[in-house]
Amino acid sequence: MRAPDCVEQVRPCISCNQGCVGGLLTSPRLGCAVNPAVGAELMLAEDLIVSTKEPKKVLVIGGGPAGMEAARMAALSGRHVTLLAARPKLGGNINISKLAPRLKTLADITIWQEQERYRLGVEVQHLC
């Protein structure tokens, strides 16, 4: 697996302990809530993504974590991506969840995804 080019490209841990420490108690496989490649790097590592020879336009609907990750993956494969978000701030319901005590780290992943969308040139359009 190839190392990121800079520190800003390292995907942050949101300290949920669901797939790693907490997951090992219930499952024999290591995992991660924000990085599906953990434990399956031979099949899912990002350096296995092949850039398309004929880039097409992709529209991703939804500015939450799943939509931002879909847009990021499409951009990594060379597509011209537009992300359509209903709200002016990206992050979806994490923007509400992070307000709860001890859940501030949940927003770390959406902050990283937003930085990645800038780096990869994903265009964002807001409905409101």
Image (tube, helix red, strand yellow):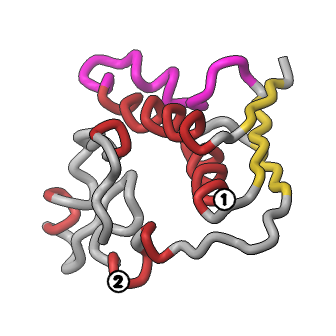
Number of other residues with Cα within 10 Å of mark 2, as a class: few under 14, some 14 to 19, many 20 or more? few
Q: Which residue is mark 2?
A: 42
Q: Nearer the viewer, residue 71 or 93?
A: 71
Number of other residues with Cα within 10 Å of mark 1, as a class: few under 14, some 14 to 19, many 20 or more? many
Q: Is residue 62 left or right of residue 3?
A: right
Q: Quadrant of the C terminus?
A: top right
Residue drawn at the location 58% of the way across and 75% of the way down? 50
Local secondary structure at mark 2: helix
Three-letter amino acid code of the residue under disc 2: Leu
Local secondary structure at mark 1: helix
Residue drawn at the location 30% of the way across and 71% of the way down? 1
Is 9 located above or below residue 22 in the figure?
A: above
The location of residue 95, given as percent across then percent down, is: 51, 23
Three-letter amino acid code of the residue under disc 1: Ala
Is 86 located above or below residue 72 in the figure?
A: above
Residue 96 colored magenta? yes
First in sequence: mark 2 vs mark 1: 2
Q: Is residue 18 left or right of residue 35?
A: left
Residue drawn at the location 14% of the way across and 67% of the way down? 25
The magenta stretch is 87-104
The location of residue 83, given as percent across then percent down, is: 75, 40
Is 64 located above or below residue 45 in the figure?
A: above
Q: Is residue 54 left or right of residue 38?
A: right
**C-alpha span from label 2 to label 1:** 20 Å
Is 34 located above or below residue 49 in the figure?
A: above
Q: Is residue 63 left or right of residue 22?
A: right
Q: Locate residue 47: give its quadrant.
A: bottom left
The location of residue 104, given as percent across then percent down, is: 32, 22
The location of residue 122, given as percent across then percent down, is: 68, 41
Q: What is the chief secondary structure element of the magenta stretch?
A: loop
